[in-house]
Amino acid sequence: MSDTPEAPIVEAGPVGRLLQSQNLSVESLGRDASGVEMIKVDRDRLLAVCQTLYADGFNYLRCQAAYDSGPGQDLVSTYHLIKLSDNADRPPEVRIKVFVPRDDPRVPSVYWIWKTADWQERESYDMFGIVYEGHPNLKRILMPEDWVGWPLRKDYITPDFYELQEAY
């Protein structure tokens, strides 16, 4: 008998079962506080998973965002997808999460599937340094082009300078 507790097995929800039926290897992460199904996807399978979901009717990327799991841990790129239709009071939703190592933060861009990813992927790149491969215009969007580092990473060290400007 082991002293370490085993992680509970999380059953796949309807979207996870759909992806598994298409022979796409994904891991169910359960549901968030709002009841939205969360799925972990390897970056190598992200485009296949997203194309499958788009073909199944997930036609709206509500939000693409990123976060830092902590110093020395993975960076995470998330995608909140919705299946919009004319008669849905509560449309199906799913949140895809891609965990990438901070020393190789590359993820394929989903811009070519959902154009709404354009500025959202640029912001994640600008703040966390995640490179969205295949993005047509991946450059800083909030910080100056010559800024060094990724300001929302938990291991970011703030520069010791402050530029003073004259009041107008």
Image (cartoon, rainbow, N blue to C red):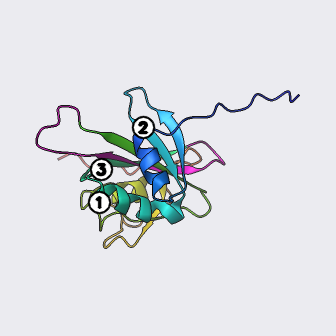
Residues at discs 2 and 1 in contact (Cβ within 8 Å): no
Q: Amino acid at mark 3?
A: Gln
**What is the C-alpha distance between the residues marked 3 and 2?**
48 Å
The residue wearing badge 3 is 165
Is residue 74 rendered to the left or right of residue 57?
right
The residue wearing badge 2 is 37
Q: Residues within 10 Å of mark 1 (few under 14, many from 20)?
A: few
Q: Kindly state the secondary structure of the residue where label 3 is placed.
A: loop
Q: Main secondary structure of the magenta part?
A: loop
Is residue 9 rendered to the left or right of residue 92?
right
Image location of residue 39, percent across then percent down? 48, 45
Query: Quick check: 34 above or below 60?
Result: above
Judged by depth in the image, the label closer to the viewer, 2 or 1, is 1
Image location of residue 168, percent across then percent down? 17, 47
Is residue 66 in view? no
* Residue 36 occupies quadrant: top left
Image location of residue 52, percent across then percent down? 37, 59
Give 96 or 146, whichever is nearer the viewer.
Answer: 96
Image location of residue 104, percent across then percent down? 59, 64
Q: Kindly state the secondary structure of the residue where label 2 is placed.
A: strand
Question: Which residue is painted at 37% across and 42% down in the image?
Answer: 94
Q: What is the span of residues highlighted in magenta in the rendered image? A: 69-90
Question: Seen from this angle, which residue lies furthest front?
Answer: 21
The residue wearing badge 1 is 55
Give 15 or 127, whichever is nearer the viewer.
Answer: 15
Indicate which disc residue 113 carries. Answer: none
**What is the C-alpha distance between the residues marked 2 and 1?**
18 Å
Is residue 85 rendered to the left or right of residue 150?
left
